């Protein structure tokens, strides 16, 4: 048996007395790729940071040992750690936007790492830096090395960070959610690059991620963490196909990207759909923005048409900048369309004012992405859910209170939450409050703008189930905006794929996903992490 | 219905700001100073052994510690302790009044400027015009036009602080206007007044309070300066500025009549500044945990 490169035994970490990690065991063999999976707050990032002695703030290791090639580095001094970091253990951080120095050229930042760790002299460092950037898959590395971080896209920055992480040929690379801030197609390219590079150099990889599908696809072994403890560890395939711990089982069942074999999906049961009855008809809608200073026009949305049937869900998928959110805001009347028609129940919405806009708004309500931002932090839950009732002058105080209680029940929240403030609720509870608020006026159409993207997998699954059951109960129609194809597949009937403001493909979900006609759609579908893991299994 | 199996609700966070304030030594010291100073001002009629204007021609220039005159007397034999207490009271009155004036004028204008772009260009240009004059020059000018007196001084200092309050509220409105909860309110067909009054103003209260603690010491010093120049509170009414001005003539004979009002002034400003800083840190979700 080979000596493990890294062995973490019974690691305990506390933040000012509050335990964050309570007994984590972890082993990485040379050249092995291990994924640590868990929800936010599970202690996965804390464990990774403890290994390289970079615990933030009041974080302290309170127990257990971390051994690096047999050497105990649990309480190693700063000098030893500094040598360890970068030279022996590389790190690719989560957020590519804030981890590069904005006032220093990218090439210089790579070269600096080399010089600091004595990998090469000042003279040859710039040349070596360009080589490294090229290896990390950055096109035209010579020219790019002279640029500043703000001239880089998110994906390019992450490549630069990978180049820095691997600059000194470390034996282990810790990648902390390396792609969660990036678009799916970019995500895939970055991960492929990371894969190829670590394989080529024989570097072991410790991948920290919340995405079980991604972990399964990229790692040899998966370690599942929950509430500061390792609940399960084993080969990726074994953990996914025969999860032993109940938490892992729930995680596997909830992961939308793994749900291919889970359910026939809503596309399989057309019961709610009565053909020909459209709640929303959008035809040839465009939105142009004037670019300030240059006099040019930006077509954020270009000639988009679709319909949503009663009790049905139409999804718009696309990456950031594809115009999907602008489309949703035009439907809601929050952004005015430059041209085209949007009809709600046969009535034109574009350009409506006064009482008729009021009536249209009563029929459609939004649920936004970030439940932390979409609820006024100064208001109680009761007041938040009752707000639309008040603005529309519906009912008196007592009637509104009763309605709020009813809505809370509808979204499965306990009535005693009514007097709480949003910051006293969890992310999932907040999103339920946002849904209850959207339902208050009895709308026919609910526009969900990335409504589940900010939530952990298990919570996301619950919210999706809630949305589905509300649709069945109330005959709601959804316009569902998402960048996550896996989520769309499990919820929507019809789908539009948007890119750079245009619709590249649209049709029933089953058709589009089974036989994508457009190469971009195919690329998006291939980018779903973990999609291939089960292809042989199901 | 789906069962609720999710992360437990976050610990109760209300009162977190207060707890944070309490843990910050600067905040505790500042809060204590503010409390002492305010108590001294409010209780001046009870605490002061003499009337601040009562003269004792037989005992001018007494040293501090003299029996009957704990902090000594000035050139006219007036009790310095009594005058400092009443002077503090006047300073705080002017400070509070000017904060009130700055808020009553500045907050609504800031909200309007932040919410409506077309109004912004008008209001902000006016504010910039006012900022172009150093605020003391402005206050001196206004006091000269309106005459002296506590109310006029407070009004002049308050008006001079309007642009500062306006800009802070405008910036906060600009930020809050783009938040998702305001967007959600729009899609509920909430009108601009409802959004401004019920969403934006309550969320801006913390920055308004912090700004008030910044304006307060500025106004207190401003009052002392105006009174020193004879444009603020008129003698024989007590004011820290007047005391300094009077004491200045006899500075070489005895420094005590100038020392105590100076200390009082410093303590008032230090207290509000420390407290305001700590309050800002406590209310800012971005600092600390």
Image (cartoon, helix red, strand yellow):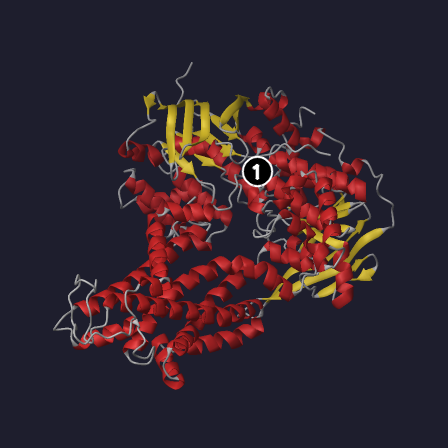
Foreground of the two, A213 or A48: A48
Quadrant of the rendering where the C terminus of chain B is positioned: top left
The front one of B150 and B20 is B150
| Residue A317: % across, % down | 67, 47
The residue located at (57%, 38%) in the rendering is B9
According to the image, label 1 marks what residue? B9
Numbered circles on residues, count: 1
Tell me which chain the residue with mark 1 is part of: B
Query: Which residue is rendered at x = 78% and y = 38% of the image?
Result: A267
Q: Is residue B200 above or below residue A312?
A: below
Quadrant of the frame with the N terminus of chain B = top right
Q: Seen in the image, is A223 located left or right of residue A513?
A: left
Judge by depth and name the residue closer to the eye, A475 or A101.
A475
Q: Is residue B196 left or right of residue A174?
A: right
Looking at the image, the residue that sits furthest to the top is A1
**Residue at 35 percent of width and 43 percent of height:** A128
Left or right, A187 with respect to A383, comes to left
Residue B210: name its quadrant: bottom left
Residue A21 lies, in percent from the top left, at 45, 29
């Amino acid at each position: 048996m080979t000596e493990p490169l890294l062995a973490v035994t019974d690691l305990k970490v506390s933040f000012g007395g509050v335990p964050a990690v309570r007994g984590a065991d972890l082993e990485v063999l040379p050249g092995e790729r291990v994924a640590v999976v868990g929800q936010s707050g599970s202690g996965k990032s804390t464990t990774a940071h403890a290994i390289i002695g970079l615990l933030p703030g009041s974080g302290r290791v309170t127990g257990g040992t971390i051994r690096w090639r047999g050497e105990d580095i649990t309480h190693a001094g700063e000098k030893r750690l500094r040598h360890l970091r970068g030279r022996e253990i590389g790190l690719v951080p989560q957020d590519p936007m804030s981890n590069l120095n904005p006032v220093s050229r990218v090439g210089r930042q790579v070269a600096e790492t080399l010089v600091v760790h004595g990998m090469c002299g000042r003279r040859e460092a710039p040349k070596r830096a360009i080589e490294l950037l090229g290896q990390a898959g950055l096109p035209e590395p010579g020219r790019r090395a002279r640029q500043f971080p703000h001239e880089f896209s998110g994906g390019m920055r992450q490549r630069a960070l990978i180049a820095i992480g691997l600059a000194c040929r470390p034996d282990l690379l810790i990648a902390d959610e390396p792609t969660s801030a990036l678009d799916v197609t970019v995500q895939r390219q970055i991960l492929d690059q990371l894969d190829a590079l670590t394989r080529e150099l024989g570097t072991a990889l410790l991948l920290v991620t919340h995405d079980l599908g991604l972990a399964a696809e990229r790692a040899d072994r998966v370690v599942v963490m929950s509430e500061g403890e390792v609940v399960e560890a084993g080969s990726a395939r074994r953990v996914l196909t025969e999860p032993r711990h109940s938490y892992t089982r729930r995680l596997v069942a909830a992961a939308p990207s793994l749900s291919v074999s889970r359910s026939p999906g809503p596309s399989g049961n057309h019961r709610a759909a009565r053909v020909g009855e459209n709640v929303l008809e959008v035809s040839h809608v465009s939105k142009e923005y004037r670019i300030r200073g240059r006099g040019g026009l930006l077509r954020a949305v270009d000639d988009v048409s679709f319909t949503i049937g009663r009790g049905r869900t139409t999804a718009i998928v696309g990456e950031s900048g594809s115009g999907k959110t602008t489309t949703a805001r035009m439907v809601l009347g929050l952004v005015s369309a430059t041209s085209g028609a949007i009809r709600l129940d046969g009535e034109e919405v574009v350009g409506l004012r006064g009482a008729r806009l009021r009536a249209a708004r009563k029929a459609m309500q939004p649920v936004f992405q970030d439940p932390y931002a979409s609820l006024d932090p100064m208001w109680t839950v009761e007041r938040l859910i009752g707000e639309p009732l008040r603005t529309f002058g519906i009912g008196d105080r007592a009637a509104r209170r009763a309605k709020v209680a009813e809505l809370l029940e509808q979204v499965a929240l306990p009535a005693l939450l009514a007097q709480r403030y949003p910051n006293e609720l969890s992310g999932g509870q907040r999103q339920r409050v946002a849904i209850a608020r959207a339902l208050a006026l009895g709308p026919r159409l609910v526009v969900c703008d990335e409504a589940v993207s900010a939530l952990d997998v298990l919570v996301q699954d619950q919210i999706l189930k809630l949305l589905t059951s509300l649709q069945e109960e109330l005959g709601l129609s959804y316009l569902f905006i998402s960048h996550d194809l896996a989520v769309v597949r499990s919820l929507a009937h019809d789908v539009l794929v948007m890119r750079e403001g245009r619709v590249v493909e649209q049709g029933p979900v089953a058709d589009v996903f089974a036989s994508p006609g457009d190469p971009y759609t195919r690329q998006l579908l291939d980018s779903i992490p973990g999609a291939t893991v089960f292809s042989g299994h199901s | 219905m789906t069962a609720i199996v999710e992360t437990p609700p976050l610990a109760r966070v209300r009162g977190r700001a207060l707890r944070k304030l309490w843990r910050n030594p600067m905040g505790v010291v500042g809060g204590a100073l503010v409390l002492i100073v305010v108590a001294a001002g409010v209780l001046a009629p009870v605490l002061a052994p003499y009337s601040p204007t009562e003269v004792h021609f037989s005992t001018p220039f007494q040293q501090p510690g003299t029996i009957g005159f704990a902090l000594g007397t000035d050139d006219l034999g007036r009790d310095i302790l009594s005058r400092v207490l009443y002077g503090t009271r006047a300073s705080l009155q002017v400070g509070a009044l000017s904060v009130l004036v700055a808020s009553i004028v500045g907050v609504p204008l800031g909200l309007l400027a932040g919410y409506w772009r077309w109004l912004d260009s008008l209001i902000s240009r006016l504010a910039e015009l006012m900022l172009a004059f150093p605020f003391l020059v402005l206050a001196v000018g206004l006091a000269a036009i309106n005459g002296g007196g506590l109310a006029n001084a407070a009004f002049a200092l308050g008006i001079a602080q309007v642009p500062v309050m306006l800009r802070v509220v405008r910036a906060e409105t600009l930020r809050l206007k783009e938040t998702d909860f305001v967007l959600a309110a729009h899609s509920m067909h909430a009108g601009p007044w409802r959004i401004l009054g019920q969403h934006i103003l309550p969320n801006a209260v913390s920055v308004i309070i912090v700004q008030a603690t910044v304006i307060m010491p500025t106004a207190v010093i401003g009052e002392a300066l105006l009174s020193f120049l004879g444009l603020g509170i008129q003698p024989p009414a007590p004011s820290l500025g007047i005391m300094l001005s009077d004491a200045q003539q006899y500075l070489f004979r005895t420094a005590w009549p100038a020392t105590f009002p100076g200390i009082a002034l410093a303590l008032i400003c230090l207290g509000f500044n420390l407290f305001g800083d700590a309050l800002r840190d406590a209310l800012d979700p971005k600092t600390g945990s």
